[in-house]
Image: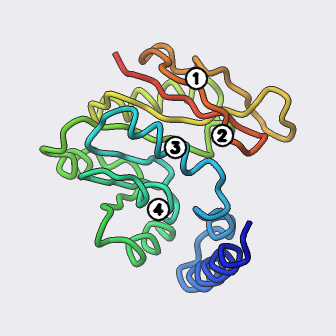
Amino acid sequence: MKASTKLWLRSKQAAYFALCRIFGFDRWHYRIVRENCRYFDKVRELYERSGCSSVVEVGCGLGEIVAGMRAQRRIGIDRDPKVIRAARFLRSHSVIFLEGMQPDALGSALQGSGSVCLIFLNWFHACDAGELQRVAAHYIENTNATHVIFDIIKSDARGYRNIHPADVLAAHGDVVAVEDAGDDIRQLVLLECR
């Protein structure tokens, strides 16, 4: 990492640390930012490959990933109201942020948005396959998503509760691509919904 990039990363993390103190969200949100998230560019490439005009990231945290997508409509959803307040403070001019699953608000936000790609990152490993099926079905149905991007943990990674195969959401569509995320921990999957 270049010195200028490292300096930008540290200053951004310091600003997010200050926001953490002000808004009271979990500390891990300020540690993972775009500049040290080696898979960000690959997520953006998969999104562009989907051809979707809108993106919804479930579990968006501070909105680092969803804000970087080149989409006509960007929506970030997180269950933590504290991190959503901070995300709105940072990015409400370019991203719509919703707390939890608000079907009415999500439906209104997506009205006239064209094709939708869902992004699920950094939390699948905390859920069993049954829970993933329920959550994915809920969001796919409520967004009419045509594509889903999610990450899976590699089988040789340690310390993760659940390691799912790339076809964990096969009931909802077909796997179009599986890409190495470049972080030695995860792979990124692009699913085309049926």
Task: Residue under label 3, please give it.
Answer: 43
> SS for tag 1?
helix
Q: Position of residue 87 (x, y in %)?
A: 44, 70
Image quarter hosting the N terminus: bottom right
Q: Residues within 10 Å of mark 4 (few under 14, many from 20)?
A: many
Name the residue that disc number 1 marks.
Answer: 130
Neighbour tally class for label 2: few under 14, some 14-19, many 20 plus, Cα within 10 Å: many
> Is 65 situated above or below 50?
below
Query: Which comes sooner in the sequence, label 2 or label 4?
Result: 4
Q: Which residue is mark 2?
A: 181
Q: Amino acid at mark 4?
A: Gly
Q: Amino acid at mark 3?
A: Val
Of labels 3 and 1, the one closer to you: 3
Callout 2 amino acid:
Ala
Q: CA distance from mark 2 to mark 4?
A: 19 Å
State the image quarter where residue 126 is shown.
top right
- The residue depicted at 47 percent of the width and 74 percent of the height is 86
